[in-house]
Image (cartoon, helix red, strand yellow):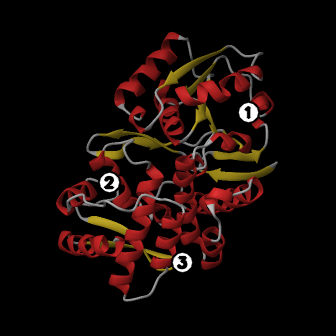
Amino acid sequence: MQELSVRHSNGSYSILVGEGLRFKLHKFLSKSYSKILIITDETIENLYLDDVKKGLSAYDFSQLIIPAGEKSKHIDVYYDAQTKAIETGLDRNSLIIALGGGVVGDLAGFVAATFMRGIDYIQVPTTILAHDSSVGGKVAINHPLGKNLIGAFYPPVGVYYDTETLTSLSERETRSGYAELIKEALISSEDLLEEMLSASLASLDQERLQTHLMAGIKVKQGIVEADEREHGIRSHLNLGHTLAHALEAELGYGNITHGEAVAIGLLFAIHVSEREYNCKLPFDKLKNWLVDNNYPLTGFTVKAEKIINHMKADKKATKQRIKMVLLERPGKLKTEELSDEAIQVHLETFRERLV
């Protein structure tokens, strides 16, 4: 088992990564909670919910099962979760357990942040993608006009990452998660990027996966400790996400996975960076790796006007001016404000490079 600690303005929390953690969550709880609400989705319910419940027999707990997928990050599901918390008698000394991927973690975390003005919650991620979303305390739900527009900064009291749960992931879920790992490599260094891009997802062993996960988590840890509420370098974690969030909003949440959208967004950020900074970046190397690992890059036919409108509604935009995180090189990033006209040209030339 490996352990990291993340400091924040009100204290710190541990991240534990290892095998079998889902069976022994009771050993990690920092206090005796009056009640526990486990929030998970229909997929994880059938796989791991009973395992978690076995270790909580000494606690008064209940469960809420939500539909699997991005569409559960919706105000109606959020309201249902609040109703469940009230009806089961949760109080300020209660705990919410987010058991699942990024959707479950974001939703359950936002429920915890707002129930009785904030109660404890822990993250129990079950996907590669959730290595990113479970760390840092960003919790949110979506609005039809934009992703994660309704949310808060609210850190968990612990993150317990059982790597055994990753063995049940589909090929698509593995691809989705690795897009965020590639993002963290681009933020970190050329060396980490080279290591990530040397991996074939079809033949990935658990040891190498755990190595990559820890590397990604450490990148995230360092950034969120330095800039908890995104006043500076934490915005670098949005690399690739300006286009990604626009694609998700336009195509419909769940019709393209977050990681698939991020993969396209990373390529676009590199493309824009090369044009804006007149430099050579690993566009072809990343594109070839994405193609080799079956990321869906073809069919990028969304109208530029619609993409731009979604970009301007993004939470990073200021006065409806589009902001993008760009690369001067892996490990050196800047945030730039770009005009609609510039984005239009970049989208047209990017589409040509995807063919």
Name the mark on residue 331.
none
Q: Is residue 10 left or right of residue 80?
A: right
Residue pictured at 62% horizontal, 25% vertical: 46
Cα separation between marks 3 and 1: 35 Å
Residue 174 in percent (x, y) is at 58, 51
Mark 2 in CB contact with mark 3 (< 8 angstroms): no
Residue pictured at 31% horizontal, 39% vertical: 143
Q: Give the residue number, with chain letter if any, for mark 2.
A: 247
Of callouts 1 and 2, the N-terminal one: 1
Q: Give the residue number, with chain letter if any, for mark 1.
A: 22
Of callouts 2 and 3, the N-terminal one: 2
Q: Give the residue number, with chain letter if any, for mark 3.
A: 330
Residue 231 visible from this viewpoint: no
Residue 335 in percent (x, y) is at 39, 71
Q: Which structural element holds mark 1?
A: helix
Residue pictured at 31% horizontal, 73% vertical: 350
Q: Is residue 174 left or right of residue 263?
A: right
Residue 182 in percent (x, y) is at 55, 65
Q: Is residue 143 left or right of residue 18?
A: left
Q: Is residue 305 left or right of residue 214?
A: left
Mark 1 in CB contact with mark 2 (< 8 angstroms): no
Vertical order, 287 against 154 (above or below): below
Q: Which structural element holds mark 3?
A: loop
Residue 193 visible from this viewpoint: yes
Q: Nearer the viewer, mark 1 or mark 2?
A: 2
Q: Nearer the viewer, residue 77 or 307?
A: 307
Amino acid on which the number 2 mark rests in the picture: Leu
Q: Residues within 10 Å of mark 3 (few under 14, many from 20)?
A: many
Of callouts 3 and 1, the N-terminal one: 1
Q: Nearer the viewer, residue 141 or 194?
A: 194
